[in-house]
């Protein structure tokens, strides 16, 4: 129960930051649009089922779409991110179950290099899909690439300090309830 409440608080905090801070900031450049709300999806437990993960991604994206008044762009990008997440974790997580006892992705559970690859790949996938959907209505391919790379870089520059400033406690999986 504590884990559900903690994740709901994270969701509302990231929604608040995205809608009332990042979206209200004046744009640095037309190619740069930082996002952080999907970090909530990165931090969900390893044990979450893929089907539930997709539902949570859809709800998260729809909430962002509602507040930012975008027609399903973020919901689609979150679904894409949640579809890819189990595959990327499967590739980056240690193979031995004795080495892998953590409940959620973090620099402590995956180690820094694989965790950085994890957040980079998922952030790039999210921004690529989101910008692609925006690009279908206007823009050149060069603008598309620049916006994807710039938005991904800025988002990563925000995610890394958050990981360093607010480390999550090492929660281990056990066979005991709780």
Image (cartoon, helix red, strand yellow):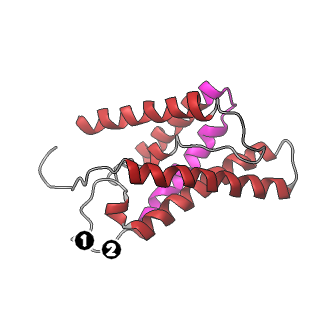
The one of 30 and 15 positioned closer to us in this rendering? 30
Depicted 40 relative to depicted 101: above or below:
above
Magenta range is: 65-90
Q: Residue furthest bottom?
A: 96
Residue 115 in view here? yes
The one of 100 and 53 positioned closer to us in this rendering? 100
The one of 25 and 73 positioned closer to us in this rendering? 25
In terms of secondary structure, where does tag 1 sit?
Answer: loop
Apparent side of residue 150 relative to residue 112 in the rendered image (left or right): right
Name the residue at 50% across, 29% down. Answer: 16
Which residue is under mark 2? Answer: 95
User: Tag on residue 157?
Assistant: none
Does the magenta run of residues contain 109? no
Main secondary structure along the magenta-highlighted residues: helix
Q: Quadrant of the N terminus?
A: top left
In terms of secondary structure, where does tag 2 sit?
Answer: loop
Residue 62 in view here? no
Question: Mark 2 near mark 1, Cβ–Cβ under 8 Å?
Answer: yes
Q: Position of residue 87 (x, y in %)?
A: 47, 63
Cα distance between the residues tagged 2 and 1: 8 Å
Mark 2 vs mark 1, foreground winner is 1
Does the magenta run of residues contain 87? yes
User: How many other residues sit within 10 Å of disc 1, few (<14), some (14-19) or many (≥20)?
Assistant: few
Which residue is under mark 1? Answer: 99
Q: Position of residue 63 (x, y in %)?
A: 54, 29
Q: Position of residue 85 (x, y in %)?
A: 48, 56
Q: Quadrant of residue 28?
A: top right
Q: Position of residue 156 (x, y in %)?
A: 56, 55
Apparent side of residue 28 relative to residue 81 in the rendered image (left or right): right
């Amino acid at each position: 129960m504590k884990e559900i409440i903690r994740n709901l608080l994270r969701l509302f905090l990231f929604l608040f930051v995205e809608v009332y801070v990042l979206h209200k900031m004046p744009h640095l450049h037309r190619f740069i649009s930082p996002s952080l709300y999907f970090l909530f999806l990165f931090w969900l437990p390893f044990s979450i089922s893929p089907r539930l993960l997709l539902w949570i991604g859809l709800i998260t994206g729809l909430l962002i779409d509602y507040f930012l008044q975008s027609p399903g762009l973020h919901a689609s990008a979150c679904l894409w991110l949640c579809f890819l997440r189990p595959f990327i974790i499967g590739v980056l997580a240690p193979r031995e179950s004795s080495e892998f006892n953590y409940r959620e992705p973090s620099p402590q559970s995956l180690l820094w290099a694989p965790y950085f690859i994890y957040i980079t790949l998922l952030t790039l996938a999210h921004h690529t899909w989101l910008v692609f959907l925006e690009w279908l209505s206007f823009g050149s391919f060069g603008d598309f690439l620049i916006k994807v790379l710039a938005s991904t870089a800025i988002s990563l520059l925000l995610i890394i300090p958050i990981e360093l400033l607010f480390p999550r406690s090492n929660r281990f999986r056990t066979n005991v309830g709780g």
